[in-house]
């Protein structure tokens, strides 16, 4: 059964999305959307960021963690992606429980 979205959840999602985009404006990145998931009475937002500024990872993670802590318990995972056919980047996957 799908849970109906309410206005407060959508406003919060857009707020988090916009604040992350503000942080990332100073970096070479790719970030599009946040997805809402519902697990056992817990609503969470998840997203992925491709960070092409390889030497800025710690700086971005620090800012991202500080932001997400304002909204609830959060976690992130970082993987370095190296391909023969595209630019190397860090994939930052994050989740915040709201």
Image (tube, grey):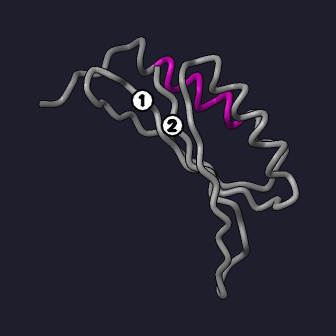
**In the shown orientation, is residue 66 left or right of residue 72?**
right
User: Which SS does the magenta portion mostly show?
Assistant: helix
**Residue 35 position by quadrant:** top left
Query: Which residue is found at the position 56% from the left and 37% from the top?
Result: 75
Q: Which residue is mark 2?
A: 95
Looking at the picture, how far across and down is residue 33, in whole percent? 51, 43
Q: Which residue is mark 1?
A: 44
Q: How many badges with numbers are in the image?
A: 2
Looking at the picture, how far across and down is residue 77, in whole percent? 59, 49
- Element type at mark 2: strand
Look at the numbered discs 2 and 1 and tell me whether their residues touch, using CB distance below 8 Å: yes
Asked if residue 23 lies in the magenta stretch, the reply is no
Vertical relation: 4 (above or below) 32: above
Q: Which residues are magenta?
A: 11-21
Query: Which residue is found at the position 39% from the left and 34% from the top?
Result: 36
Asked if residue 13 lies in the magenta stretch, the reply is yes
Query: Disc 2 and disc 1: Cα gap in Å?
Result: 7 Å
In the displayed image of the protein, which residue is found farthest to the left? 1
**In the shown orientation, is residue 50 left or right of residue 47?**
right
- Element type at mark 1: strand
**Residue 42 position by quadrant:** top left
For this rendering, which residue is in front, 72 or 4? 72
What label sits on residue 80 in the rendered view? none
**In the shown orientation, is residue 21 left or right of residue 42?**
right
**Residue 23 position by quadrant:** top right
Vertical relation: 45 (above or below) 31: above
In the displayed image of the protein, which residue is found farthest to the right? 55
Q: Quadrant of the N terminus?
A: top left
Query: Which residue is found at the position 56% from the left and 49% from the top?
Result: 93
The answer to which of marks 2 and 1 sits earlier in the sequence is 1
Query: Which residue is found at the position 64% from the left and 29% from the top?
Result: 18
In the displayed image of the protein, which residue is found farthest to the bottom? 84
């Amino acid at each position: 059964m799908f849970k109906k979205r309410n206005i407060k959840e959508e406003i919060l999602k857009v707020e988090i999305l916009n604040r992350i985009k503000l942080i990332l404006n100073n970096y070479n990145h790719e970030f599009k959307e946040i997805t809402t998931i519902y697990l056992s009475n817990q609503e969470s937002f998840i997203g992925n960021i491709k960070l092409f500024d390889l030497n800025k990872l710690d700086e971005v993670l620090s800012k991202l963690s500080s932001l997400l802590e304002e909204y609830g318990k959060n976690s992130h995972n970082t993987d370095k992606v190296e391909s023969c056919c595209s630019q190397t980047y860090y994939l930052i996957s994050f989740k915040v429980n709201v």
